[in-house]
Amino acid sequence: MADKIKAPPGISFPAPVTHQEFYTATDGTQWLMEIHVQWSPSFESRVRLLKMPERISVSLPSNLPYIEVVPENIREAALDGPFNLQAITNYYLQRCLAMLREYVERFGNTL
């Protein structure tokens, strides 16, 4: 998901963030969660869920909360003021990871 954005005066964009986390569900299945977020030159986020050990990519429904990592309304508000974009990114990255863990726990055996 990419949106062209310009940095307001006095705001610098954080470096792109790529996060990988291995997760073992309560049923013993193993997963790799990959999240990438960049703010400049355009906002872009990617979320991937891979079933291990085969690294099979799982399609995620587009209506999952935090699937775009940082919601659009938060991105717009963050750019309107002197906010710490790195802190905002890290906060929503953790929310996205929590959502992925819950998704795996609820639906992992059907994926």
Image (cartoon, helix red, strand yellow):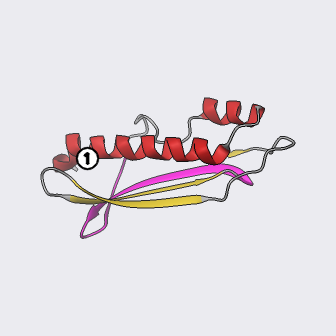
Q: Quadrant of residue 20?
A: bottom left
In this rendering, the answer to whether 79 lies above or below 32 is above
Residue 108 in the image, given as x and y percentages of width and height: 21, 48
Count of numbered circles in the view: 1
- Amino acid at circle 1: Val
Residue 69 within the magenta-colored segment of the rendering: no
- With 96 as the anchor, is 85 left or right in this view? right
- With 61 as the anchor, is 68 left or right in this view? right
Q: Which residues are magenta?
A: 40-60
Residue 44 within the magenta-colored segment of the rendering: yes
**Residue drawn at 68 percent across, 54 percent down:** 14
Q: Residue furthest bottom?
A: 54
Residue 80 in the image, given as x and y percentages of width and height: 76, 31
**Residue drawn at 18 percent across, 47 percent down:** 110
Can residue 68 be seen here? The reply is no
Q: Residue furthest left?
A: 27
Residue with the mark numbered 1: 104
In this rendering, the answer to whether 74 lies above or below 52 is above
For the residue pair 2 and 8, the one nearer the viewer reads as 8
Helix, strand or loop at mark 1: helix
In this rendering, the answer to whether 101 lies above or below 57 is above
Residue 35 in the image, given as x and y percentages of width and height: 47, 55
**Residue drawn at 43 percent across, 40 percent down:** 95
Residue 104 in the image, given as x and y percentages of width and height: 26, 47
Magenta stretch: dominant secondary structure: strand
**Residue drawn at 30 percent across, 67 percent down:** 55
